[in-house]
Image: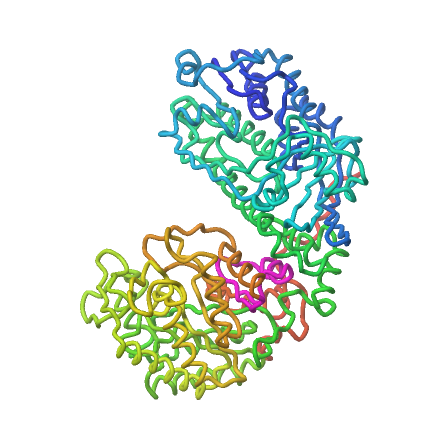
Amino acid sequence: MRVAVIGGGPGGLYAAALLKRLDPAREITVWERNAPDDTFGFGVVLSDETLGGIEHADPVVYAAMQREFVRWDDIDIVHRGHRSTSGGHGFAALGRKRLLQILHERCRDLGVELRFRTQAPPAAELTASYDLVIAADGVNSLTRDAHADVFGPRIEEHRCRYIWLAADFAFDAFRFEIAETEHGVMQLHGYPYNAGESTVIVEMREEVWQAAGFDGLGERESVERCAKLFADALDGRPLRSNNSSWIRFRTVVNDRWSHGTTVLLGDAAHTAHFSIGSGTKLAVEDALALAACIEEQPTIERALKAYEEERRPVVTSTQRAARASLEWFEELGRYVDQPPRQFAFNLLTRSRRVTHDNLRLRDPEFTADVEREFGCPPGTPPMFTPLRIGGLELRNRVVVSPMDMYSAVDGVPGDFHLVHLGARALGGAGLVMTEMVCVSPEGRITPGCAGLWNPQQADAWGRIAAFVHQQAPGTAIGLQLGHSGRKGSTKLMWEGIDDPLDEGNWPLSAPSPLPYKKGSQTPQELTRDGLTEIREQFAAAAWRAARCDFDLLELHCAHGYLLSSFLSPLTNLRTDGYGGPLANRLRYPLEVFDAVRAIWPDERPLTVRISATDWAEGGTGGDDAVQIARAFAAHGADAVDVSTGQVVAEEKPAYGRSYQTPYADRIRQETGIPVIAVGAISSWDDVNSLILAGRTDLCALARPHLYDPHWTLHAAAEQGYSGPGIAWPLPYRAGSRRPQTGRTDAPKPRLTLG
C-alpha cells in the first residue's frame, strides 16, 4: 500500500507512524509546506483517555511524550479579585514543537518519508499513484476546498477574537482570568506546557477588540497590551508571540469525510473550540481510529466508511460541547455579576460535560462552598432547595412538564388523567403541570384534547386538583391554558402527528390564513370580533381554573399555537395593529394575558410559556425572546417557561442534551425574570448543575416522567437525600431506599494465595 499524507501536523504524522508501524511494507510519504519547527500555538493538552489510546497503539511515542509531560489537577478562576480553585481535574500537556519532534523522530525511525517546505500535489493527482490520501491539511484545507461539492463543508466564524501567546513561567493550574475593562469583558486562558513555559490565550468579543483599539495594533504592541491587561495573572512578566495574530475561531463541519480514496482528518474534517481541549487531541484520536479501521477492513473504501461511522458520533458530541463552551465565553458579560463561587461553577460546567455530581467527586470542598453560597441547606442537593414564585412556595425545583395525553372525551379529563397526574404528584416533583387545556372546542389540537369551557370539565379538573392537594401535600399543581390556532383539528399523536382529521374537522382560526404544513387545513384570519371572543374564552377558562383550586396558571404562547403564532413573523403577516413589528405582534397575546391576570387570583402565580426561537430563518430568535419575556413580566408574569420551536414545520432544531436551556439562561441573566428551563434535561445531575450555575430557577422534565412517574423521589434516594424538599407518601415510604441487587455485587470468595 502507498499512502500520501497532506499536512505534517500531529494528526498527519501520527497517522503515518501508526500505519507504517502496523505494516512496515507500506510506503508512506508526508508533505508539509512549512519548516519542521514551524507551528501555531505553544502547548498541547491531552486527556488521559487519549493518552491511553496512544500508549496502547504505540508505546514508543507514548514513552517519549510521557518524559515531557507537565501534569496538574487544579483549575483557577480569577474574577473581581477572588480566586476560586477546583481540583481533581487531571491535565497533561507538552510543547507543540516538542510533540512534533517526537513524531518526526518516530516517523523517520519507522521509514516514513518526510518532505518539509514542500507543497503537496493536489489530492486528485496523488490518488493516481497512491492507494490512500490522508488530507490532514488543517482548518484551511485545500483538499477540502477542492472537493467541496463532495465533502459539503459548512464553516461558521464566531464572535470572539483571540491571540495565541506564551509566557516564560509555568502556571501552577489551568487559569481563567476575567478582566472587566472600559471597553468590555476580556478573558485569559492559561496553562503550563513544561516546567518553565505556559500557553496564554487572550480572547474577547469582536466589538470589544475593536473598541480597545487592538484592530490598529501590530503584533508587538498587541502582545505588550495583553501583558498589561493581565499583569496580575502574569505577575508583571512579559508575553511573547510566534507570528501570532488575532483571529476568529471557525467551526468546521463536513457532510462527508471521504471522497474515493481521499479522507479528511483532524481540523480539515472538524474543529472544536480550544476552551474544551485541543484540536490535536481530536486529530490524534482520528489517526488512531483510521489506522485501526484500515487494519480491520478488507478494502480502503470499507475502512474509510467504518472510520467515519466510528468517529462522527464522537466528534459531533465534542463539537456540541465545544459550541456550548464557546458561546458561554462569547456571552461572558452576562455572568460577571454572579457571586464568585457560582461564577466559577458556571464556568466549569459551561460545556455540560462537567457536572455538579462529578465536580462533587473531584473536589467536594469546592462544590460544598458553591452550594453554601447558593443557599443550599446542609446536605441538600440544589434541586431540593425551595423556591418562591409569586405567592407560591415550591419545595423543590423539579417540574413535571405539560404533556398532551390526547385521552379526554369531549374535553373532559377522566380517570386516566387522575391517575396520570396523581401518580406524578405522588412522585415528588415540586410542581406538576397539566397538559395544554383548551379554551373552546375549536381551540383543541385533537378530538382527545382536554378543555375547560364548561362546568362538566371544571368538575373533573377540580377532582384532580383536590386529589393532588389531599394525597400529595406539598406538591403544587398548575394548569396550562391554550388555544391550538392553525395547528388544530388533527389526529391523535399516535395516529399521525399534525396530520388533519380524515373527517369531522372543525374550522381553524389564526392571525393569518397560513396552513401549518402542506396538506393542513387553511385557517381563517381572525377578525376583531373573533379576537374578542377568544380573549373572553381565555378569561372564562381562567375563572374556572381558579375555582378548581389550581395553584398556578400558565398561558401557552409557544409551539405555534394561537398566541404563539401572533408572536412569530413567520406566522403573523397581518397589516393591522396586531402585525408588523414585534411590539404589534405582542399586542394580542398581552391583551389575553391581561384578561387572564385580571381574573386569576393575585396571590397565585401566573406564568407564560414561549418559544424562544423558531429554529427557522427570519423567525423569532434570542433577541426577540428577551423582549417578549420583558413584555410579559411588565404585565405581571411571575416566571417565563422557555421552550423553543414547533412554530413552523420547516424548522431545523439543533437537538442535543439540554439544548433549549441556553435560551432560558439568557432570559434569566438579561432580565432577572425567574425562568423554567426545558428540553432534553434527563438526569438529576443536569438539574443540579443548571440550578447551581444560576442558568435557571426550575427545570421541567417531560419524557423522564413518562418513563418514571416517581423520578423525583428516586433522584432523592439516589443522592441519599431525605430532607424537607421531598416527601415520600406514607404508603410508599418503605420504598424510599434503593432495593438490593442480586448476588453479583456480593464479596467474592478468596480462591488464590498471595
Residue depicted at x 56% and y 30% = 283
Q: Up-down: is 56 above or below 405?
A: above
Q: Is residue 556 magenta?
A: no
In the displayed structure image, the side of residue 375 where residue 708 appears, left or right: left
Picture coordinates of residue 601 (x, y %)?
49, 86
Q: Up-down: is 23 above or below 72?
A: above
Numbered circles on residues, count: 0
Quarter of the figure that contains the C terminus:
top right
Picture coordinates of residue 274 (x, y %)?
61, 38
Query: Which image quadrant is residue 391 in?
Result: bottom right
Q: Is residue 491 visible?
A: no
Picture coordinates of residue 370 (x, y %)?
72, 60
For the record, the magenta segment spans 672-699
In the displayed structure image, the side of residue 518 where residue 358 appears, left or right: right
Q: From the viewer's side, name the closer residue of 646 and 16.
A: 646
Q: Up-down: is 53 above or below 124?
A: below
Q: From the viewer's side, name the closer residue of 401 and 647.
A: 647
Q: From the viewer's side, name the closer residue of 77 and 259.
A: 77
Residue depicted at x 34% and y 88% = 455
In the displayed structure image, the side of residue 159 where residue 417 appears, left or right: left
Q: Is residue 694 magenta?
A: yes
Q: From the viewer's side, name the closer residue of 754 and 609.
A: 609
Q: Which residue, as the protein is rendered here, is positioned at the far left? A: 503
Picture coordinates of residue 512 (x, y %)?
27, 65
